[in-house]
Image: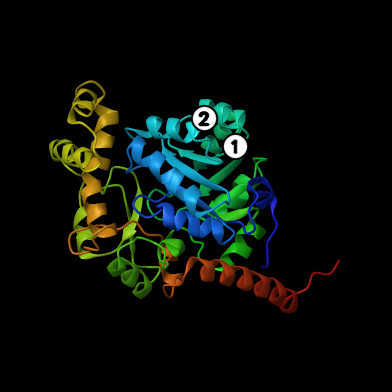
């Protein structure tokens, strides 16, 4: 099979510099293993999982692939520390963290020979993560699904590539081989393709949502702070327009957070103390919790009439539902063809 060699592929021992980011209810064992088996890196989403479910998922992935894989953890979220602890006990090859300090994660993962990737959206966080000793950065641009940064990938990637020394995974706007080649030209060492890999045969994303992604264009998204309290990109539907119209009332958010806690098996007693003693932080978590029900309605149940779906602007590039292997092979072929074509389109003379 054809391969693309970069600093990232050498670091992670993968064939192709394409990453499946950890997307809740989507990046499950079957999809993670499919991406790793196809030559990329699959990252398990642990956000919706209990520690026991995380351990079971890690062990299931190992039954499905002998290739490198990772787990993702949003450290701000309740339960993240426990899930990371499970990953460390299981000696998962790659740990990807976001929204928190990962110094101790780096120390312990390096202790057993693993690698750590930090997800960042700006220079401040990139430098902090590099200082903590991470092995690579997933740099999320404005085009990305969910919580992308303020700056587009076209500017953010070369800006950070010139200011940090570790390999960069470009996230936000990448769904094709042309995009992969462009990212490498901008200074990245690989790309994350969340929306593209979510819309594959092996993905557990609801079929109705896959069809909606295929039908929609790059302009059919909304970027708003009103859905879950952080600026996030979602598919443009009547339901998402209503959800993004105004911020969620704090009392309603707190109430919804209880329901979200129950949905993921978290005891209510773990939510109430935080609401009373750390209001700002817990209000943000309550907004996350309130959004969870709408996200699950879309992602799991395929209900876009009431649910809301995180999606990137790259939905306009998806075009169809393929197998993971076909997506990755096509990207490699497209990147090679585009590289050759560029040599025909222009030349540089001294």
Left-right relation of 291 to 184: left
Q: Residue 289, position in %: x, y?
A: 24, 41
- The earlier-in-sequence mark between 1 and 2 is 2
How far is the residue under mark 1 from the one under mark 2?
10 Å
Residue drawn at point x = 37 percent, y = 73 percent: 214
Q: Residue 33, position in %: x, y?
A: 49, 55
Residue under pointer 1: 114
Taking the view exactly as shown, the residue that stands out farthest to the top is: 277
Residue 99 sits in quarter: top left
Can you say whether 97 is above or below 344 in the image? Answer: above
Residue under pointer 2: 105
Which mark, by number, is residue 89?
Answer: none
Residue drawn at point x = 52 percent, y = 25 percent: 104
Camera-nearest residue between 39 and 187:
39
Q: Residue 285, position in %: x, y?
A: 28, 36
Asked whether residue 225 is in view, the answer is yes
Q: Secondary structure at mark 1?
A: loop
Q: Secondary structure at mark 2?
A: helix
Asked whether residue 172 is in view, the answer is no
Few, some or many C-alpha atoms within 10 Å of disc 1 (few <14, some 14-19, many ≥20)?
some
Can you say whether 272 is above or below 239 in the image? Answer: above
Few, some or many C-alpha atoms within 10 Å of disc 2 (few <14, some 14-19, many ≥20)?
many
Q: Residue 6, position in %: x, y?
A: 69, 54
Q: Nearer the viewer, mark 1 or mark 2?
A: 1
């Amino acid at each position: 099979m054809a391969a693309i060699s970069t600093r990232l592929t050498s670091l992670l021992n993968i064939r192709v510099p394409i990453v499946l980011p950890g997307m809740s209810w989507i990046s499950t064992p079957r999809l993670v293993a499919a991406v790793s088996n196809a030559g990329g890196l699959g990252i398990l989403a642990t956000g919706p999982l209990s520690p026991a479910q995380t351990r079971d998922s890690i062990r299931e992935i190992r039954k499905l692939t002998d290739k490198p894989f990772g787990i993702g953890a949003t450290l701000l979220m309740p339960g993240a520390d426990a899930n990371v602890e499970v990953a460390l006990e299981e000696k998962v090859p790659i740990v990807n963290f976001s929204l928190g300090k990962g110094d101790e994660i780096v120390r312990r993962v390096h202790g057993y020979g693993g690698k750590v990737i930090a997800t960042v959206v700006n220079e401040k966080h990139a430098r902090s993560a590099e200082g903590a000793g991470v092995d690579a950065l997933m740099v999320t641009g404005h085009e990305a699904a969910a919580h992308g940064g303020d700056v587009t990938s076209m500017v953010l990637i070369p800006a950070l590539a010139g200011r940090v020394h570790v390999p960069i995974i470009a996230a936000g706007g990448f769904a094709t081989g042309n995009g992969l080649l462009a990212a490498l030209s901008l200074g990245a060492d690989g790309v994350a393709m969340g929306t593209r890999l979510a819309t594959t045969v092996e993905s557990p994303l609801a079929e109705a949502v896959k069809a909606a992604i295929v039908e929609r264009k790059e302009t059919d998204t909304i970027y708003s702070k009103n859905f879950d309290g952080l600026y996030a990109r979602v598919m443009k539907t009547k339901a998402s327009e209503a959800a993004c119209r105004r911020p969620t009332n704090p009392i309603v958010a707190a109430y919804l957070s209880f329901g979200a806690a129950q949905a993921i098996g978290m005891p209510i007693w773990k939510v109430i103390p935080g609401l009373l003693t750390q209001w700002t932080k817990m209000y943000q978590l309550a907004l996350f919790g309130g959004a969870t029900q709408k996200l699950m309605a879309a992602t799991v149940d395929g209900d876009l009439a009431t649910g809301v779906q995180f999606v990137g602007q790259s939905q306009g590039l998806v075009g169809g539902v393929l197998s993971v292997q076909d997506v990755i092979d096509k990207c490699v072929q497209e990147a090679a063809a585009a590289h050759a074509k560029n040599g025909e389109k222009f030349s540089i003379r001294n």
